[in-house]
Image (tube, coloured by chain):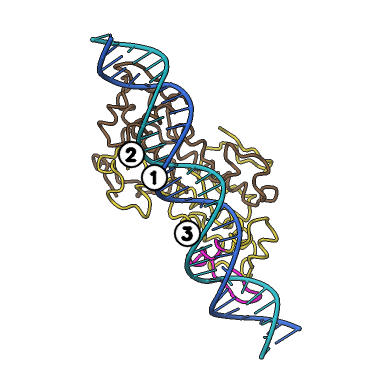
Chain colours: A brown, B yellow, C blue, D cyan
Amino acid sequence: MLQLTKRTEYALIALTVLAGREGEVVSVREIGELYPVPRRLLAEVLKELSRAGILASQRGSNGGYFLTRPAAEINVAQVVGALEGLPAIAGCSSEDFEPGACEVEPVCPIRSPIQRLRIGVWAVFERMSLRDLAEPARPPLSRAVPVGSGASDGSSSGSGSEA
Amino acid sequence: MLQLTKRTEYALIALTVLAGREGEVVSVREIGELYPVPRRLLAEVLKELSRAGILASQRGSNGGYFLTRPAAEINVAQVVGALEGLPAIAGCSSEDFEPGACEVEPVCPIRSPIQRLRIGVWAVFERMSLRDLAEPARPPLSRAVPVGSGASDGSSSGSGSEA
DNA sequence: AGATATAGCACTAGATCGGTGCTGATTGGA
DNA sequence: TCCAATCAGCACCGATCTAGTGCTATATCT
């Protein structure tokens, strides 16, 4: 399945909030009040991002999480990498792939193409920063990915709700 | 998990063979003799591709499968789409997503960014044709994806880790 | 002290995936 | 004509992963 996990979705939602309030400490409760996500699970996810160094935490009352770096310097690839490992595309290009696990590997004709796909997908995620997440108005990918020439979500349509 | 299924991997391997023998009818057995893939599963996958119109089949002895169009006109996106559905990235952008299934949807702040990611990933898959698969020498993505500066991995000597 | 909030660990139910079994239909050849 | 090779269709099982929760400890502010 070429799909992010719910954990990652929740992470991105939370990071949207964090990116919009740089410098502030935001608690899981606050985020949960903004968006109907399972708080417990969200907490688990933010802990992971904290362990990965993307967030830092403040314990105790008035505690919460905050970005360790400017939102513009954190990209989706880092987030996905922290929660799911690097996009693997195929098992043989995964992080925890042990040689010999795939019978085809020694003669595999698609290793090189898979690598290229992986790099390409990775690049797509790298090109979107948390600032781009928090400000959906600007089309950050239209420059780099010349495929949706006019299809890159018309923009200027206020608070994003396009099909 | 941002990873193709084994089914899709096997499909791509088989299609590499098919693309290298355009016009010929190739049986599951032949492909299984070339690459150590579970033949039964491979057969199941090729049936699916046949139902999707990417392949056509010839029954009886001397039977097998063949491409319905030139290899250069079939891209990885079509194959992935046929076997896994379009790359969804998130559940809410999946094909079989029913409105109301996601609590966050009405107020979701990342729908638009997710869409952009989806389009970008889709584009990466679209840009690689079966001909590119069959001829790994040429680097078809280096033009369109300017991220691997010189990292197009010249020889497949394994470990392409660029972090 | 007590309320708030994160840290850490483990656990369950459900979905998905990888792979297989079996039966039938079609084609070419001995 | 009969047989072997091959695809078509359906259903099934075990392993793995995901989504979500329970519980307890620790830190901080008032």
- Residue at x-position 60% and y-position 35%: B161
Asked whether the viewer can see residue A69, the reply is no
**Image x and y of residue A100, in percent:** 68, 43
Residue density around tag 2, few if under 14, some if 14–19, many if 20 or more, within 10 Å: many
User: Which residue in the protein does label 3 denote?
Assistant: B82
Q: Tell me the mark number nearer the camera, choosing from 2 and 1.
A: 1
**Image x and y of residue A153, in percent:** 32, 46
Label pair 2/1, CB-CB below 8 angstroms: yes
Instruction: Say which chain tag 3 marks.
Output: B
Q: Is residue B63 magenta?
A: yes
User: Which residue in the protein does label 1 denote?
Assistant: B90
Please name the amino acid that badge 1 sits on: Ala
Q: Quadrant of the C terminus of chain B?
A: top right
Instruction: Say which chain tag 1 marks.
Output: B
Q: CA distance from mark 2 to mark 1?
A: 10 Å
Disc 2 secondary structure class: loop
Please name the amino acid that badge 3 sits on: Ala
Q: CA distance from mark 2 to mark 3?
A: 27 Å
Label pair 3/1, CB-CB below 8 angstroms: no
User: Which residue in the protein does label 2 denote?
Assistant: B110
Disc 1 secondary structure class: loop
**Precedes in sequence: disc 2 or disc 1:** 1
Q: Is residue B103 magenta?
A: no
- Asked whether D22 or A104 is in front, the reply is D22
Q: Mark on residue B126? A: none
